[in-house]
Image (cartoon, rainbow, N blue to C red):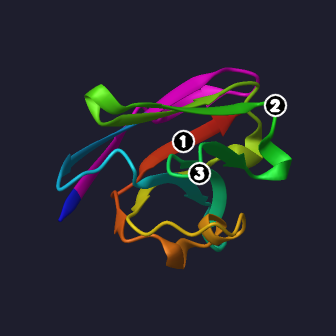
Amino acid sequence: QVQLVESGGGLVQAGDSLRLSCTASGRTSSSDTMGWFRQAPGKEREFVVAIVSSGGYTDYAESLKGRFTASRDSAKNTVYLQMNSLKLEDTAVYYCAAATRYDSRSSYYTSPQSYDYWGHGTQVTVSS
């Protein structure tokens, strides 16, 4: 079992920055793929970014490239999501997820179904 705990969410104004953290515990592995998703009210869970350690790359949702940056500190079992120039439409609950299986298809980790473990989420609200 892997436990994931997100933190760092909050209420910010448009244009501000925010950094989310996700700390993993339990049977973690540095080879697990770590992903961030978000879900706005009334909408489906949306892919944000995946850190595919086994593949040696990070995959971002096209619409978020340039504003969001993900990173991983394996020594701390923590992944981060730096969000800059926040917009009203970034308002959502942000979830951290871990996938234990490696798949070489670039689209594999954009699907929530590819992940085995999820955190409870952290709310990000962007106001005008």
Q: Amino acid at mark 2?
A: Gly
Q: Amino acid at mark 3?
A: Gly
Q: Secondary structure at mark 2?
A: loop
Q: Inspect this view and state whether residue 81 appears.
A: yes
Q: Nearer the viewer, mark 1 or mark 3?
A: 3
Q: Nearer the viewer, mark 2 or mark 1?
A: 2
In the drawing, what numbered circle is on residue 124?
1
Q: Secondary structure at mark 3?
A: loop
Q: Is residue 83 left or right of residue 77?
A: right
Q: Is residue 85 above or below residue 122?
A: above
Residue behind mark 2? 66
Q: Is residue 42 left or right of residue 79?
A: right
| Residue 124 image offset from top left, x and y in percent | 54, 41
**Bounds of the magenta segment:** 3-20
Residue at left 71%, top 63%?
Answer: 106
Q: Mark 1 and mark 3: span between their CA atoms? A: 29 Å
Residue behind mark 3? 55
- Is 12 covered by the magenta stretch? yes
Disc 1 or 3, which lies upstream in sequence?
Answer: 3
In the drawing, what numbered circle is on residue 108?
none
| Residue 27 image offset from top left, x and y in percent | 17, 56
Residue at left 22%, top 59%?
Answer: 2
Q: Mark 3 and mark 2: span between their CA atoms? A: 21 Å
Q: Is residue 56 left or right of residue 78?
A: right
Q: Quadrant of the N terminus?
A: bottom left
| Residue 5 image offset from top left, x and y in percent | 29, 46
Crowding near pointer 3: few (<14 within 10 Å), some, many (20+)? some
Disc 2 or 1, which lies upstream in sequence?
Answer: 2
- Is 126 covered by the magenta stretch? no
Residue at left 80%, top 39%?
Answer: 65
